[in-house]
Amino acid sequence: MNVLFWAAQLILAAGLIWAACMKLSQPAEALAQMWPWTAAHPALVKVTGMLDLLAGLGLVLPILLRIRPRLTVYAAYGVVALMIAASIFHISRGETSSIGINIFFAALAVFVAWGRGRNAATL
């Protein structure tokens, strides 16, 4: 099971860090072509970019470095909250077809929180 938890954590971390890099480094015009919502909400782009980066790092680094590994569980809960908020945001904009990745990431994060949380004593 440990391999499955690591796989889920790495998939989530890679996706979140990629999204963070895009949101924090790309010009607004380039982002608007990929994600139309970014043109109307430039501040939200930066905030979610920072949250994505922190969540991606938080899913991997605490356990990998053995420094407060319980933080990985909290990062997973944060990803669930972030994905719920993103889904609500996209639904409110009529972009329901865009929430598939949010649901997938939320499900992976629930799996990580559950698995790492039940083994919290051994982390």
Image (spheres, helix red, strand yellow):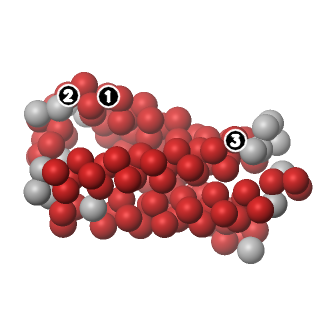
Q: Which residue is mark 1?
A: 46
| On screen, residue 66 above or below 8 | above
**Amino acid type assigned to the residue bearing label 1 in the image:** Lys
Residue 75, percent across and down? 59, 44
User: Which residue is painted at 70% across and 65% down in the image?
Assistant: 115
Along the viewing direction, whichever of 106 and 9 lies nearer the viewer: 106
Q: Which residue is mark 2?
A: 42
Q: Which residue is mark 3?
A: 71
Q: Are marks 3 and 2 in contact (CB under 8 Å)?
A: no
User: Which structural element holds mark 2?
Assistant: helix
Residue 40, percent across and down? 11, 33
Q: CA distance from mark 2 to mark 1?
A: 7 Å
Is residue 3 in view from this perspective?
A: yes
User: Which residue is painted at 29% across and 55% down in the image?
Assistant: 87
Quarter of the picture holding the N terminus: bottom right
Residue 60, percent across and down? 65, 48
51 sits to left or right of 66: left
**Amino acid type assigned to the residue bearing label 3 in the image:** Leu
